């Protein structure tokens, strides 16, 4: 699916927030917070981990960065049940992701690579065969490398893909921050 | 990756069109808080990329701080208020 057809800004923000919140809470419940002897650091890691998986999963496999994030998380192995809990709720995930969890990481990585390759091939066919533009040349290599290191799966992307993924990633990050902030202020009010 | 691209095009540079890049960069500018407020059309692509990286890093930091804060808040959420009960039942 070409990313340009998604137009993240046109998608109602509130539904994305709700998706994220729903999945995040699911993940948090799975982290068994009721264990009172969980250290602050452990709990923080669990919160952040659930938040990241929820953010990526809210994209339902439609973006490269979200698939990379999930496949990287699946590799770590420790909280795979949280990943399964959150991903299991996705309604229209491609069938291949429903396979056995131990193969999930390699499957996800294949999907990531394949989809980026396909997108790159599509771009090349669509591209105008004009002379190389100065702006394209001047997307400074160094800055591009930094950006690639910040976006999950960035190292597989070409310039167009990278910028589109960045747009979506930033939108999702903002949703994540907004929801987390709301929960934090609600918790503060609740404990007063 | 770039070596694959240069094999395709004779000049050794990407064949992506100017207009596509301009369009995407302008969309990126809309998202960046600092550049959006400046109302200048003359922001270079390099500057946009730099601001983008800074913005993403600051968002990451904020997520990290919020996670820490939530971790402390949720640890101590023992109060008897109605909201506390709701949050407890949602998350724990």
Image: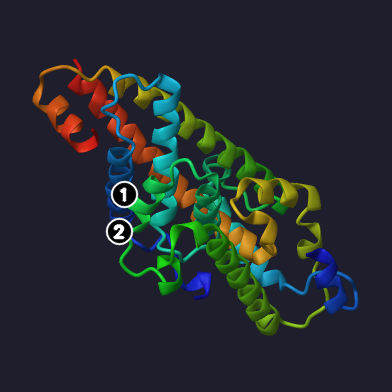
- Mark 2 or 1: the one toward you: 2
Q: Residue A23's mark? A: 1
Which colour scheme appears in the figure?
rainbow
**Left or right: residue B37 compared with residue A155:** left
Q: Secondary structure at mark 2?
A: loop
For marks 2 and 1, the one nearer the N-term is 1
Q: Residue at x 49, y 76 (%)?
A: A1
- The image shows residue B72 at horizontal and vertical percentages of 35, 19
- The image shows residue A44 at horizontal and vertical percentages of 42, 28
Reply above or below: B74 against A73.
above
Where on the picture, by quarter, is residue A27? top left
Q: Which residue is mark 2?
A: A89
Whether tag 2 and tag 1 are in contact, CB under 8 A, the answer is yes
Disc 2 is attached to a residue of which chain?
Answer: A
Q: Residues within 10 Å of mark 1 (few under 14, many from 20)?
A: many
Q: Residue at x 86, y 71 (%)?
A: B6
Nearer the observer, B33 or A171 = A171
Q: Residues within 10 Å of mark 2 (few under 14, many from 20)?
A: some
Disc 1 is attached to a residue of which chain?
Answer: A
């Amino acid at each position: 699916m070409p990313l340009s057809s998604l137009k993240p800004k046109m998608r109602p923000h509130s539904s994305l927030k709700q998706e994220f919140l729903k999945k995040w809470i699911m993940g948090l419940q799975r982290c068994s917070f009721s264990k009172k002897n969980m250290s602050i650091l452990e709990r923080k890691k669990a919160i952040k981990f659930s938040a990241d998986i929820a953010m990526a999963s809210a994209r339902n496999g439609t973006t490269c960065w979200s698939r990379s994030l999930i496949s990287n998380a699946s590799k770590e192995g420790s909280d795979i049940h949280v990943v399964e809990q959150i991903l299991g709720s996705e309604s229209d995930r491609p069938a291949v992701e429903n396979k056995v969890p131990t193969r999930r990481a390699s499957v996800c990585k294949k999907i990531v690579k394949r989809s980026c390759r396909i997108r790159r091939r599509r771009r090349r066919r669509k591209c105008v065969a004009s002379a190389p533009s100065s702006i394209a040349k001047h997307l400074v290599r160094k800055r591009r490398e930094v950006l690639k290191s910040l976006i999950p799966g960035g190292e597989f992307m070409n310039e167009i893909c990278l910028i589109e993924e960045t747009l979506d990633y930033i939108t999702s990050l903002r949703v994540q921050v907004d929801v987390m902030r709301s929960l934090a202020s609600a918790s503060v009010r609740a404990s007063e | 990756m770039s070596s694959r691209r240069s094999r395709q095009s004779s000049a050794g540079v990407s064949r992506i069109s100017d207009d596509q890049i301009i369009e995407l960069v302008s969309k990126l500018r809309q998202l960046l808080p600092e550049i959006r407020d400046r109302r200048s059309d003359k922001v270079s692509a390099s500057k946009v990329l730099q601001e983008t990286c800074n913005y993403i890093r600051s968002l990451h930091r904020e997520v990290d701080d919020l996670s820490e804060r939530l971790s402390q808040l949720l640890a101590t959420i023992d109060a008897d208020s109605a909201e506390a009960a709701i949050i407890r039942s949602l998350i724990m």
